[in-house]
Amino acid sequence: MEESYKSIKIEGKTPNSGVIYLYLNRPSQRNALSREFFTEFPKALSSLDQNPNVNVIVLSGTGDHFCSGIDLKTLSSVTDHTTSTDRGRFSEKFRRDIRFLQDAVTAIERCRKPVIASIHGACIGGGVDIVTACDIRLCSKDAFFSVKEVDLAITADLGTLQRLPAIVGYGNAMELALTGRRFGGLEAKELGLVSRVFGSSYELDQGVRLVAEGIAEKSPLAVTGTKAVLLRSRELTVEQGLDYVATWNSGMLLSDDLKEAMSSNIQKRKPVFAKL
């Protein structure tokens, strides 16, 4: 039986495709992140990760915007001081609450399958936290971004300050985070936040579909391995990274996928790989 969610929805658009679409689904609230989201999102990602029929996940938003950030009601519930009169106990619980919210975003990186962010309209605050954790980011020309937390008297704490510098550079990340200024899709491309910008939402949908379908047709062992090694290599020196991938490939390289890739290339046909 398919899981029912309040803050997200899951769709398969093409029969027998390995591409699944995961939507932030609160369009009337511009897909603001509710408390339910932080429970449902990692649960959905884990389910898709374990589904052998899923090769690639496209993350998008219903309605006119990708995500307008964390819902203020969610923020109020996390910062409610009335739960304890003991400052130490309140602070300990507050830290656990922040870690709980962080974990929902980090679930994107824990997912073995590639997650492609398809961004249109607003991508603000928590939306930036989410897309910086994604593996590929594509947007429409009308998309706009803001690391907005500083304007709410908050130090961004769900991943942007940790992930954005590696994507756009330390100086650019510092400027965007300190000013909270709004910037558009074309500037996002110049900064390296997104790989491609499309002229309209329709063109974005078509472009994302082609990228996702192309990845979904490749060896799932090679795809999941590439994601895992790239993520791990962020924390390693080049020499450590080379040692890590050597160990990885010593266990994964000699597979039926390798045989299929080689034989299909010789026979000039499209390879067909087993599910993972």
Image: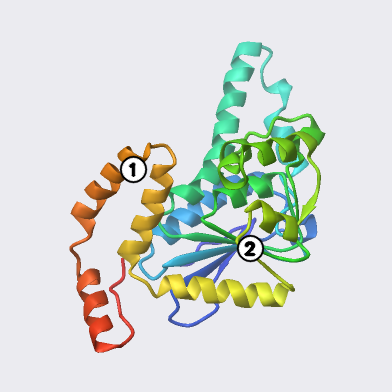
Q: Secondary structure at mark 1?
A: helix
Vertical placement of 94 versus 149: above or below?
above
Amino acid on which disc 2 is placed: Ser
Task: Give the number of the mark in front: 1 or 2.
Answer: 1
Quarter location, residue 22: bottom right
Q: Residue at x 74, y 55 (%)?
A: 187
**Dot 2 surroundings within 10 Å: few (below 14), some, or many (20 or more)?**
many
Q: At which x and y percent is residue 99?
A: 55, 32
Q: At which x and y percent is residue 105?
A: 56, 45
State the count of labels: 2
Quarter location, residue 223: bottom left
Q: Residue at x 37, y 36 (%)?
A: 237
According to the image, label 2 marks what residue? 60
Q: Residue at x 70, y 59 (%)?
A: 66
Disc 1/disc 2 C-alpha distance (Å): 32 Å
Judge by depth and name the residue closer to the eye, 103 or 34.
Answer: 103
According to the image, label 1 marks what residue? 241
Counting residues from the N terminus, which is met first, the one under dot 1 or under dot 2? 2
Judge by depth and name the residue closer to the eye, 233 or 213.
Answer: 233
